[in-house]
Amino acid sequence: MDLRNNLSLIVNELMAPVLPGVLMGTLEDELNNLLTSSPVNIERINRLVHKYKSSTVQDADSYARWQKLENLLQLVAASPNQEEASAYLRLMKNMMESTGQQKRPSLKLHESSLSTHLLESHDNMMTPIKNSRSSPVYAESFENIDRYSDRRSIVSSNYGGMARDRNSSVTLSSLSDPYYSCVVNEKEIMNYLPFTLLATTSQMFTFDKRGVHIPENIPNGESGMLHILFEAGLLYRFIQKQIDTYRTTNALSPLKTAFLTFVNQQLHEYMAVVNRISNSPHIRSLKALYIDIKDWILEFRIYYNLMIDFQQLRGDHLLSRVHDLKDHGDLLVKRVSNSLYGSLDQIYYQYLVNWLTRSQLDTHQEFFVETVLSPDHGPTSLKLNMDKVPTFISAPTAKEIYMIGKTSLFLEKECMEIQWINDCNQKYFKVYGAMKGNAVSLEFCDAVRSHHSEINSFCKSTLESKYSFSRVLDMLKDVLLMGRGDFIDQMICNSADFLQQSSAILPSYKLTRCLQESIKQSSLRYMLATQHTRKIVDGIDARVLELGHGSIGWDVFTLDYLAEQPLATILEFDRSGGRKVYLRIFNFLWRIKKNNFFFQEQWSRNNTLARDFRRLRRNKPLVRDILKKMYKVNALKSNVQHFNRKIESYCFQSIIEKNYVNLRTKISDERRDLEGTIKKTKIKNGLVVAQGILRPQNLLMQKIGMKARVSYQKHTPSIDELRQIHDEYLQKVVCNKLLDSASPNRRPGTFSKQYYPSTLILMLNDLFEFILRYSEFNDVIHDLLIHLSLQSSDEVSELLKKLNDLLSKIVAHYRWIQKTSYYLIKDLKADGDTELLSLSKILR
């Protein structure tokens, strides 16, 4: 309703002289409909004005009135809501009433446009803002200046056009003094500013949880400068509060404590600078003050970013972040980070020296070497945490540092080389202490590399000379992996009688006596000559596994090796890791050896029976028929036994021996030939030449007095590398496709749909079943021999019938073995592996 009334009054006052009364009412109604519709269409308003404008007489006064009406309507139509549109109409109505627009055709102000009256009432002459009910006040700061409209006031817009009518009796100072009398000057601000820079509440600037409050009577220019300067005070307050909070914490690490101490010293230095500035007569403006403290603002920003996550950050991460800032492009950031890093790296360097020369660990979990507690309350182990390695230490250097301390503990506690460790630690303690700056540098990395090489060489020589590491590996292969065939064969021969017994009644003393006799009867007896080699043989042990009720000795018998410390640690026998793998392989190979033994035993028995049959003088046709059947069965037996020997030969030669040769190559002192590292390239004519410039030969270098280069680098494996090499060796053996029974990547055979280990175990069982039938065959032949020798023909017919039935079973079982082996060969051939393809050709 307010919009309609104001619009009606303005249209009547503007258009009454040029528009008839009938058209006036119609124009008002149409304008009201257009302005109250949503949304307001400015184009329709323009067409409506043009329609009524064309029906009037066109002169200068009429044109001016229509132009004012059109401008007013466009302004009202552009308003976001009716409230603001009504405000524009009220403003126009007040202007027309105050200037006597209805009486005078043109605007002539008799009062100065810059008079005191107009300035005091200028709020009513401003173009309205969105919130017209809030009277304009002086801006609190330069940020909220956008609250005001950018349109000029009526006074300022008409100022230039009314220059002829100005009253020059009013001075500019008399007009501006009422405004500037309540504005704070810069000198007064400077008196209170030092308190705010030190986070102290003053009479002018007050602190609370939200920040610093700037009075409303400070000009925008000074307010903008204060926003920049007060950042120093706010950062100072935050940092000081954090330091006071963490000082009361007793769990702070040395690195964090050193960081807080350094920052606190910088805060005290900043306080001294602010106090000096407050008493300095040369700093009289905010800009001059900013020049003096701008570096402190940037420095406090660095501390602020580091202290935001101070509680979650570990000391090593804090040190790495400070070190990374040293490479910043800003010189000030680089200077601050260098100073801060210099106060922290001394502590971390002490961590490194303590570990390298004393094998002592940091108790605040800031070092990259950690202790790992065993879940079964066993001995604690050490772990290299690469996540804690600072950025200024490379990964290879960190591994060398880790291995130096770990090897020192190994030599001291398990090898009892206390004297050598003390001498080595004292030597390198002097080396690390004499380094310039006591910081991690290239010189430090070279010393670590030398220390690592020296301690690894001594450890390797100690394991060889004192504990016969290489010979123990040979013994493990010869005994547990059956590499020494004469000892295993002798062991089987000596234990064959009592291994037929049940495992529940198998006496342990028989196993021990059998083991001792087998050692003395095999080539191992030569190792009993000296005390040093005798200790290696004494590690062999024989025992039985617990497989449950009903098992016989052949199923539960196993050989073991009791490695002494520290070899048990490297071979992981103390955690049963390596021992279990050895026992798995031994159990598989034991089946093959058992089959070979019984094949040989029954074949010898069959040969004896055949010789006795040939000596018989009577029943020649029957004897020839029996011998003929014996020869046929022996032919089948030879094929089956040959298949068993092929499996044994492949497992030992292509799996065990091949990987063992690689093992011995890796654990020996490797010499890395530098000649092999020369980069080569092929030129257009096909020749392969060295890429780049080659050094002269060593002989020529020596002649001209220069140092000859070393053509190789010596590398001694560490104890962790020895353990890893041994583990890889066992894994390559047990994870071979033919023996792999636990890997998730294994695939079943293409034709048999069975895994290779399962197929081999079933085939070895089938071979043993064939041996049992072959043994029954020999039993029947033996009975026939007795009856024919005694000329007792009563049971000969029954024995011959039994012999024929047994022959049928042997042939049927042989065909089953042939069929199974045929599918195995097809699976091996279709696997795609070249080694398995070679095995398929061998077995075919």
Image (cartoon, grey):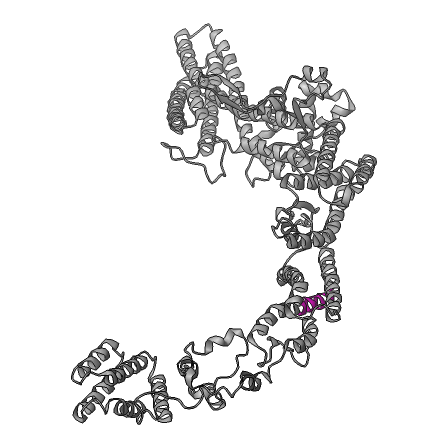
Q: Is residue 170 visible?
A: yes
- Identify the image quadrant of the C terminus: top left
Q: Is residue 121 left or right of residue 72?
A: right
Residue at image point 50% right, 18% down: 688
Question: The N terminus lies in which quarter of the figure?
Answer: bottom left
- Between residue 99 and residue 588, name the one nearer to us: 99
Residue placed furthest toward the top: 617
Q: Which residues are magenta?
A: 236-249
> Looking at the image, is 15 positioned above or below residue 341?
below
When asked about the image quadrant of residue 547, the answer is top right
| Secondary structure mostly seen in the magenta stretch | helix
Residue 466 or residue 178, whichever sits in front:
178
Residue 758: percent from left, percent from top: 45, 34
Q: Position of residue 186 (x, y in %)?
A: 64, 75
Please say whether residue 555 is visible from this viewpoint.
Answer: no
State which quadrant residue 417 falls in. top right
- Give whichever of 51, 810 is nearer the camera: 51
